[in-house]
């Protein structure tokens, strides 16, 4: 896995509500810390609290004190977890920074579900996956897929129930079948719906490149011994990307 170049994604420009023109995104607002892919014997609704996975716990143990955004795509047995560090609001925040912090602290879960969107990009992969995923086509993540939010003082955990959506299952399973032939990138954006919230900017994202799904670690959420599994900062089966 690796971070993405936000400039490779088009987002709503400052006058989008009038002219429908998109522009290249500025740099990602949040810093990608880890992408953790693993298999679990049971569903994990709140991965940030899972002692067996230890995705967040290891980051805290290693001294990471910033506020975290945790996103978990759940398609049992596969879990795909991204974790970003969110910077504090700057002295002169732009529209996207203000919207991000309102997403974290000032929105209801219902509004969050209507605002969080993903922009997928298949870098390499079979034609069938490209057709299903599309190219640089944003989609509101909570439209047809249940999202659950768990908020604490130092993180926001977003849980994506892929198994509850037949369409999302088809896409996810096609990507899993493609396996190591697939390189895919995903950008997250909080949708700007008013002029004061534009232009948009990529919140963060990640790329997974030619993953060996068969080499992922296995955990059991009820098994504390699973905490001895490999460090999720570089899960087994995922090559280092320079």
Image (cartoon, rainbow, N blue to C red):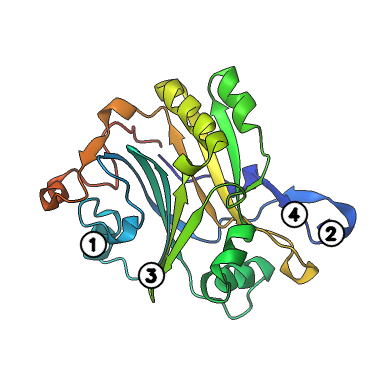
Q: Mark 3 points at which residue?
A: 66
Label 2, residues with CA under 10 Å away: few <14, some 14-19, many ≥20: some
Instruction: Report helix, strand or loop for mark 1.
Output: loop
Instruction: Return the residue nearer the eye: 136 or 113.
Output: 113
User: Which label belongs to residue 12?
Assistant: 4
Residue occupying image coordinates x 71% and y 51%: 11
Instruction: Report helix, strand or loop for mark 2.
Output: helix
Marked residue nearer the N-terminal end (1 or 4): 4
Q: Do the residues labelled 1 and 4 touch (CB within 8 Å)?
A: no
Q: Horizontally, is 225 left or right of 36 in the view?
A: left
Give the distance between the C-alpha atoms of the residues marked 4 and 3, in whole angstroms: 28 Å
Residue occupying image coordinates x 20% and y 45%: 220
User: Which label belongs to residue 62?
Assistant: 1
Give the quadrant of the N terminus: top left
Point out residue 153 in the picture as x, y percentages from the top left corner.
39, 76
Instruction: Report helix, strand or loop for mark 3.
Output: loop
Q: Nearer the viewer, mark 1 or mark 4?
A: 4
Q: Are marks 2 and 4 in contact (CB under 8 Å)?
A: no
Marked residue nearer the N-terminal end (2 or 1): 2
């Amino acid at each position: 896995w690796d971070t993405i170049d936000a400039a490779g994604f088009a987002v709503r420009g400052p006058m989008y509500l009038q002219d429908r023109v998109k522009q290249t995104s500025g740099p990602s607002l949040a810093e990608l810390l880890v992408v953790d892919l693993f298999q679990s014997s049971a569903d994990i609704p709140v991965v940030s609290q899972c002692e067996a996975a230890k995705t967040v716990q290891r980051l805290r143990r290693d001294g990471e004190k910033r506020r975290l955004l945790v996103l978990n795509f759940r398609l049992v047995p596969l879990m795909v977890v991204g974790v970003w560090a969110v910077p504090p609001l700057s002295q002169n925040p732009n529209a996207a920074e203000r919207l991000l912090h309102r997403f974290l602290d000032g929105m209801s879960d219902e509004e969050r579900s209507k605002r969080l969107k993903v922009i997928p990009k298949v870098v390499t992969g079979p034609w069938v996956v490209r057709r299903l995923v599309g190219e640089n086509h944003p989609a509101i993540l909570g439209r047809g897929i249940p999202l659950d939010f768990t908020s604490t003082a130092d993180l926001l955990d977003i849980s994506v129930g892929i198994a509850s959506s037949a369409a999302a299952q088809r896409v996810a399973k096609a990507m899993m079948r493609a396996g190591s032939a697939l390189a895919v990138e995903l950008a997250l954006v909080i949708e700007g719906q008013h002029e004061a919230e534009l232009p948009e900017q990529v919140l963060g994202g990640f790329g997974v490149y030619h993953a060996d799904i068969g080499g992922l670690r296995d955990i059991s959420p009820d098994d504390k011994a699973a905490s001895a599994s490999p460090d999720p900062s570089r899960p087994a089966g995922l090559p280092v990307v320079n």
